[in-house]
Image (cartoon, rainbow, N blue to C red):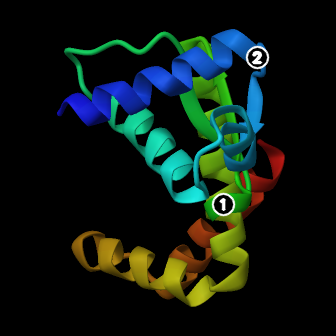
Amino acid sequence: MEAVVNRQTLVDQFVSATGMEIFANADLVKHYGCSGAEASKMIQAHLSTQRNKWVVPQFALVRYVGRTRSALWRAGNKNAVAKAAFDQFVSDTACKAERNPKAVLDVVRVNNVATRSTARQTLARIDAVLESLHHV
């Protein structure tokens, strides 16, 4: 447990020292002289700590853009980060739906079994969800 708290603390210290609100894995590597894998563990430890109701990190952290090692992370107060997290969720959902509409249809079909909706209603719901995602 101590290693997780220590890694999380390093991310907070990095943000405080550099003043960077948006940073990448490579920025942690450069700042601490550690490996990319260790920087990823720091970020994961910070995210894990955020979900722990008994430990409150100095900064909230959310994936701002991208994935894996090329991701950019945003650190800030909880309200700003919560909005960024929601925006990222909407973006991810819209991207997944556009790449694989069948997956969205499968989810809606499972819900429709319980509500006995027709296929036309199902397609209208999918269209409405996709349309709303583009306007957020």
Residue visible at 61% across and 24% down?
81
Residue 78: % across, % down: 54, 15
Residue 74: % across, % down: 69, 31
Nearest the viewer among 35 and 44 is 35
Nearest the viewer among 83 and 101 is 83
Residue 129 visible at all: no
21 left or right, relative to 120: right
Q: Please determine whether, in this image, residue 99 is positioned above or below residue 71.
A: below
Q: Amino acid at mark 1?
A: Arg
13 left or right, relative to 97: left
Q: Quadrant of the C terminus?
A: top right
Q: Mark 1 — residue?
A: 69
- Mark 2 or mark 1: which is in front? 2
Residue visible at 60% across and 79% down?
123
Q: Mark 2 — residue?
A: 18
Q: Please determine whether, in this image, residue 86 is positioned above or below residue 54.
A: below
Q: Please determine whether, in this image, residue 102 is positioned above or below residue 12.
A: below
Residue visible at 44% across and 48% down?
41
